[in-house]
Image: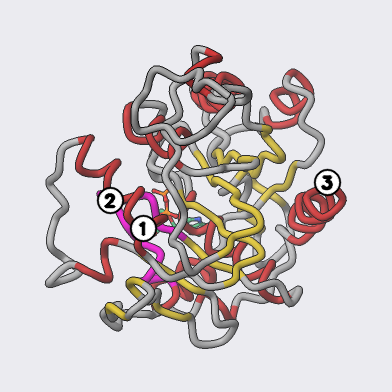
């Protein structure tokens, strides 16, 4: 049969299914040849400092607790804080199958982050967008993840160049949006949700972090950053899984001490149940 493709290096006989024929360039990065990752879930926020890394860590812990093989790819290349929360600081070792990720102590969560490969964890990462994007791709293709059920990607903040590269390079199946309850947040969350929509990625949940502070004496919930707008946003975009996380000094302390795996609150479990159950059924 005559070859249809004009690209000399293409070995396929038929053009059916080829992304270039559908007008969509394919930017996807191949996964490390010795690894298999069943589900990739992105954790996004429209802006920094809302607790995206904290939530990524807690989602991974809740998933690993259920017995799934879990990993975190720290895509927040210029502000990596995952290793610190888990108290891991061993240098990843290069093996025959790729760079070996570092495992968390209690639940064996596999972690890769720029912080693990810097000379010192206080070195600033002063890299331009394309370099940052390439780093995320290398974490996907050159790290020997092994067999993983759920990989959480702590996405670079915002809706710019770098998150776009991640969306295009990694097979992100769904995203969880992290927000805080300030008034400008509605607009910022909407941007994150619409960016996921544009990339045809499902938003499987919204987590409102720092939602309230519970008075240790009377138990009253104080909305420190203002009233929640989460239900309104979730309804507008048809997102059924929502969760609220209080401001909790204990949580901040555990993260600072590198013992996030010891946190026993169950605020995120309902969202993990829903997201995972849904993923398992598909
Ligand atoms: P982001 O990844 O969005 O930049 P981080 O996860 O690094 O944000 O969180 C920013 C800071 O806020 C960290 O010091 C973290 O320990 C703290 N923090 C996040 N969520 C909470 C919370 N629910 N209660 C107390 N401190 C929190």
Residue 107 shows in this picture: yes
Q: Which residues are magenta?
A: 73-85
Residue 54, image x and y in percent? Answer: 50, 59
Q: Quadrant of residue 27?
A: top left
Q: Are marks 1 and 2 in contact (CB under 8 Å)?
A: yes
In the picture of the structure, the residue carrying the numbered disc 2 is 135
In the picture of the structure, the residue carrying the numbered disc 1 is 139
Q: Is residue 122 above or below residue 10?
A: below
Give the CA distance from mark 1 to mark 2. 6 Å
Residue 106, image x and y in percent? Answer: 56, 87
In the image, taking residue 214 as reference, residue 199 lies left or right, namely left
- Element class at badge 3: loop
| Near-viewer residue (15 or 169) | 15
Dot placed on the residue nearer the N-terminal end, 3 or 2 = 2
In the picture of the structure, the residue carrying the numbered disc 3 is 282
Q: Is residue 158 above or below residue 127?
A: above
Ligand 1 found in image quarter: bottom left
Q: Is residue 258 above or below residue 252?
A: below
Q: Residue furthest top?
A: 23
Magenta stretch: includes residue 75: yes
């Amino acid at each position: 049969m005559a070859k249809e493709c004009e690209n000399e290096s293409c070995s396929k006989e038929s053009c059916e299914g080829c992304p270039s024929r559908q007008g969509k360039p394919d930017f996807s990065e191949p996964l490390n040849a010795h690894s298999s990752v069943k589900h990739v879930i992105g954790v996004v926020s429209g802006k920094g400092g809302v607790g995206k890394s904290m939530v990524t860590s807690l989602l991974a812990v809740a998933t690993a607790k259920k017995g799934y093989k879990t990993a975190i790819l720290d895509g927040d290349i210029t502000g990596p804080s995952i290793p610190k929360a888990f108290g891991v600081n061993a240098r990843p070792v290069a093996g025959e199958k790729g760079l070996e990720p570092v495992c968390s102590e209690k639940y064996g969560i596999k972690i890769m982050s720029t912080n693990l490969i810097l000379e010192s964890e206080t070195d600033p990462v002063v890299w331009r967008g394309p370099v940052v994007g390439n780093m995320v791709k290398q974490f996907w293709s050159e790290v020997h993840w092994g067999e993983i059920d759920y990989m959480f990607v702590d996405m670079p903040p915002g809706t710019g160049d770098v998150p776009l590269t991640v969306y295009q390079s990694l097979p992100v199946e769904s995203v969880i949006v992290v927000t805080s309850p300030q008034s400008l947040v509605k607009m910022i969350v909407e941007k994150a949700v619409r960016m996921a929509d544009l990339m045809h990625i499902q938003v499987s949940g919204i987590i409102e972090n720092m939602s309230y502070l519970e008075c240790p004496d009377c138990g009253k919930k104080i909305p420190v950053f203002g009233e929640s707008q989460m239900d309104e946003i979730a309804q507008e975009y048809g997102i059924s899984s929502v969760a609220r996380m209080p401001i909790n000094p204990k949580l901040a302390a555990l993260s600072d001490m590198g013992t996030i795996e010891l946190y026993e609150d169950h605020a995120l479990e309902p969202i993990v149940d829903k997201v995972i159950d849904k993923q398992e059924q598909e």
